[in-house]
Image: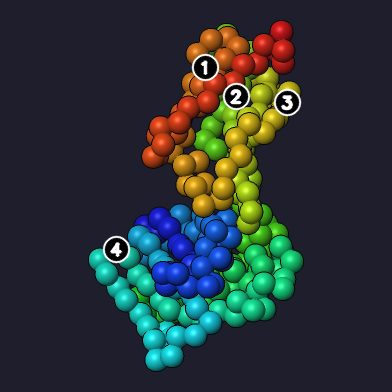
Amino acid sequence: MLKQITLACYAQGHANQFINSDTWAVSELYCSMLKSFDTGKVEKVNVNIRDEWGDFLGYYQNHASVVTIRNHFDFGSYSTLNKREKKLMQLEAVHAGMMQVAWKEGWNTDSLLDAYNQCLEKDLKYQFSVGRPKSSPNRIYKIGFWCNWDLDIFELYWILSNKQDTEIKREKFITKHPSVGEFVYYLSWKWTSYTSVILEDKYGTNESWTTEFGDEIA
């Protein structure tokens, strides 16, 4: 099962490494469309991009569960684009890399084409509900979370709803750099009282956040 796709310039100190902080959301969006795609032993694909490779262009490496492909990328053109155009150029690069890997590994490419088209259908927006809402101790309210993972920002919102799933209020309460957004896949939360919820990051930082809903459910 594929767990991650990266699009980045990996050369240490390279001038075009500026792109590495931009490419998380589109890669994650594309990868999220492939949850049921059988990639055999491959769990991670690195699409390594530069504007010059020489004889190393297209170089392919399969090391255990990680595959790397080296492709050309026009950083000069990229730097002149608006936000949506940059995301589209990233999608094209990710998809091209994945198609090359598919040909090397003998994968069926239908799922990759579907993933590409679904990204376009979503207008290149990686927005999703996190887990399932959980009921309050008195079963009157529910708390859920919603993520917006974009080119230049990662945002997490809490959503308070009633037991009929009618939204009462949503509010942004976590903002991070998009490069650290993976923690969203490892969150857990629970009601600690009738009006309080604790959210915990079980991924790397072990951060926690407490939200009080006294005003909203008084």
Marker disc for residue 210: none
Instruction: Give the amino acid type for the residue marked by disc 3 in the picture.
Output: Lys
x and y percentages locating residue 200 in the rendered image: 46, 29
Q: Which residue is mark 2?
A: 143
Whether residue 4 sits left or right of residue 87 in the image: it is left
Identify the mark nearer the N-term, 2 or 3. 2
Identify the colour scheme used. Answer: rainbow
Check the image and report above or below for 77 versus 161: below
Residue under the image location 61 percent in, 39 percent down: 175
| Mark 4–mark 3 CB contact (< 8 Å) | no
Instruction: Give the amino acid type for the residue marked by disc 1 in the picture.
Output: Trp
For the residues labelled 2 and 3, the Cα–Cα distance comes to 10 Å
Q: Which residue is mark 4?
A: 65
x and y percentages locating residue 179 in the rendered image: 51, 52
Foreground: 195 or 82? 82
Task: Estimate how packed mark 4 is, as few (under 14), some (14 to 19) or many (20 or more) residues with alpha carbons within 10 Å.
Answer: some
| Mark 2–mark 1 CB contact (< 8 Å) | yes
Identify the mark nearer the N-term, 2 or 1. 2
Q: Which residue is mark 3?
A: 169
Identify the mark nearer the N-term, 1 or 4. 4
